[in-house]
Amino acid sequence: MKYFIPLVFLAIIFGSCNKEKRQAKKDEDIIKKYISDYHLSATATGSGLYYVMEITGTGSQASASSQVTVAYKGYFTDGKIFDQSDTAGITFGLSQVIKGWTEGIPYFKEGGKGKLLIPSKLGYGSEGTNGIPGNSVLIFDINLIDVL
C-alpha cells in the first residue's frame, strides 16, 4: 500500500506529460499546415509559437514587460474571428495577456505588422475561455502601434 500512492502519482504525471506532448505535436501540425496552405514565410521561436513579419516597423521594440498599443484581429485556422480591436487598437501590459502575445509582440517594432500563430499552450490551454474552445490554435493579425 505504501507504494501504491506514489505509483498512482507518477502515472498521473507521466500521463499528463504525454497528453501535453501529443497536444503540442497536434498544434504544431495544424500551424505548419496553415503556413503551407497560406504560403506564409513564418519563423518558429522554439516554444511552439510562429510569427510572420509583414512590415518590420522602425520604432521602439517592446519587451515582455512593456505597455503597448496594438490593433489586432484574432481568429481560428478556419478563419472564424473570435475577437478584434478597432484600428486605434488597445493599450495593455504584455505581462497581462496570453503567453503567445507576451512572447510574440516583442518580435515587432512600432509600426510593425504581421501574424502570430499561437499553439494552445501559449493561448488558453486545454480549458479555453469565452467562446474559445480548449486546445485551440489561435491566429492574430498584429499591428504594433505604440510601445509606451
Image (spheres, grey):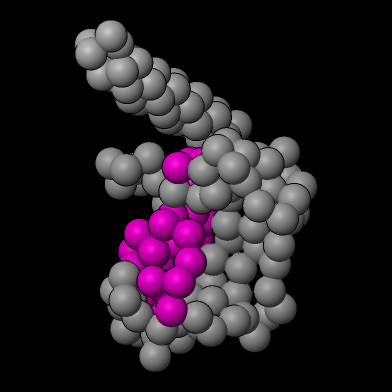
Q: Where is residue 22? Give x, y as percent.
A: 44, 21
* Residue 138 horizontal side relative to residue 118, left or right: right
Residue drawn at point x = 28 percent, y = 9 percent: 1
Q: Is residue 118 magenta?
A: yes
Residue drawn at point x = 70 percent, y = 67 percent: 84
Residue placed most toward the observer, 132 or 106:
132
* Residue 85 horizontal side relative to residue 49, left or right: right
Residue drawn at point x = 48 percent, y = 66 percent: 97
Query: Is any part of residue 35 visible from this angle?
Result: no
Q: Where is residue 13? Give x, y as percent.
A: 33, 24
Q: Is residue 123 magenta?
A: no
* Residue 8 horizontal side relative to residue 139, left or right: left
Residue drawn at point x = 39 percent, y = 64 percent: 102
Where does the magenta region start and end? 93-121
Question: Could you tell me which quadrant the C terminus lies in?
Answer: bottom left
Q: Where is residue 32? Give x, y as percent.
A: 48, 31
- Residue furthest out toward the bottom: 148
- The answer to which image quadrant residue 134 occupies is top right
* Residue 22 horizontal side relative to residue 126, left or right: left
Residue placed most toward the observer, 56 or 45:
45
